[in-house]
Each structure stands twice: as C-alpha cells, then as structure tokens.
Image: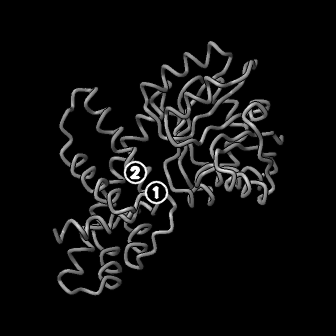
Amino acid sequence: MAKTVGIFGLGLIGTALAERLLAAGHSVIGHDVDAAREAILREMGGTPAEPAAIWQSDIVLSAVFSTDQLADIIAAAPNVTDKLLVSMSTCDPDQVVALAETADERSIVLVEAPISGTSLQVRQGTALLLLAGDPAGLDAFEEIADAISPNRERVGAIGNGNKTKLAINCVLGLNRAAVAEGLVFAEAMGLDPATYLHTALRSAARSDVMAAKGPMMVSRDFTPLGRIAQSHKDFKLICEMAARNGHGNMPMVNRYLDVMENADQAGDSELDNSAVFLAVSRMAKA
C-alpha cells in the first residue's frame, strides 16, 4: 500500500531514498535547509515542505548529517501521536539510545536503519539497512523498506544499528586508504595505474572497495557518492566510541584521521571518499 513518506535531509542519501520511494509509488515530502536540494526533490516528483508538514507523513525518515541534527528534529517536533521516526544516518550510538527515550516522551518511536553503502548503491537498491530498535516500529518500517532495499539485517536493540555501522565503516575506510596507498606505490614504481588495478582486482587483495573506488582513483574522478567530510565525521566518532569502551588507542584509525585532516586542509572535504587517494599521494611525498 502506498504511503506518504517524509524525509529530513536531502543530501546524497536523502535524495537517493526519495528516488527509490517515488519509483515504488509512494508519495515523498522532504525538507532541507538548502533550497537547491529541495528544488531537486521537486524535479523528481516529490514535494518540498516545512518541518511541521513532514511530521504529518505516515513514516518519517531522517537522513541528516549528524547526531545533533537528529536531536534538533526530535526537539522541534510538533505534538504528534505514535509517529515513527527512522534514523538512516550514521549517528552516535549512545546518543541515539538517549534520543529514543526523549522521542518516546513525545510519542515518537525512534528506530535505526543506518545504511551500509553509497548513494549509488541506495539508488540501485543494493545497500544494506542495519535495523535496530523497537520491533513493532521496525515492522512498520518494513512496509516501505522493500522500496529502498531488499537487503536488511536486524541487529538488536536501539544503538546497535549505529554500533554495527561504525564497525563496518572502520573496515571500509581503512580499506579505501589501503587501496589508495597501493595505487600510489604502484605509480611511484612506474607501473601503469589502470593495468595495475586490473591485475590487483584479479589477485588475493581484491575487495568490493577496490572494485568500486579503484577506478575512481585511477581516473581521478571524485564525483561524490559518499563524501570525505562524512568519512572524517564517522572516523572521529569511531575514535570517540573506542575510547568510551576502553580502547583509547586505535592505531590505524588514528592514522586514517591524519589522512582525513590532510584532505580537509586541502579543500577535498566535498569530494568522494575515494579522494583519500589525493591525501595519501600528498603525504607520501612529504
């Protein structure tokens, strides 16, 4: 049955979600502080709206950048009754647990469905949704979830969705950096980058990350599917969560954050996260 779905945040992921939902016959209304993003939603067949109107939807999705923005959405919610809010961003797991309690006081059921995958994978319907929280709320989300992706995994109580996402992102980010450094090393030795990548993809070093991001590094095409800024934010959160849980030193994570700082200082934050290649190249020559 077609639903009206409200979306807070119309960046790469929010727009991809809207595209999937509209294609499945659902109505989509969305809000973003950037008017240009709202204009894109209108062109797609959705309806830009003010926050109060988003809360009148059958189901509300949050695809905002940060945990603080999710908190702001909940704090500013009008009086509602048994409204479902699905957080699809990478957020602080501990704060999400606290926000679920705050939401419950406002008659909002907050559940998690952070996305493991790029905006392209969302558009293709191949991303993995990491579902966590109130089972009844998740059951209600399942009514539209097939329109987003058939790939879903329930990982337990509220907070576990983002804990799982951060642990996955840790592996993904370090993998991207490893692919970048291998490519930088190959080029430094005089190897043709395209030939090297083709060969590496046939080797034991092959990974999905190499297959997806390697060609972007070789072609120097860093059109964003997932931005450096997002990866930088996530790795800061990974480091914070590790410290909270008795692991104050994450050696590879700390080094990756050095790479992210280099990218940020060079103005690469809005590029695709495969642009880690540029930071690794600069640091290799330092």
Question: Residue at image x 77%, y 59%?
Answer: 44
Q: Position of residue 183 (x, y in %)?
A: 27, 74
Q: Nearer the viewer, residue 264 or 83?
A: 264
Q: Relative to 121, does residue 254 appear above or below in the rendering?
A: above
Q: Is residue 49 left or right of residue 191?
A: right
Asked whether the viewer can see residue 239, the reply is yes
Q: Amino acid at mark 1?
A: Arg
Label 2: how many Cα within 10 Å (few below 14, some 14–19, many 20+): many
Q: Which residue is denoted by mark 1 in the rendering?
A: 227
Question: Residue at image x 17%, y 83%?
Answer: 189
Q: Position of residue 193 (x, y in %)?
A: 31, 82
Residues marked 2 and 1 touching at CB (< 8 Å): yes
Q: Which residue is denoted by mark 2 in the rendering?
A: 231
Quadrant the C terminus occupies: bottom left
Asked whether the viewer can see residue 149, the reply is no
Dot 2: element: helix
Q: Is residue 64 left or right of residue 226?
A: right
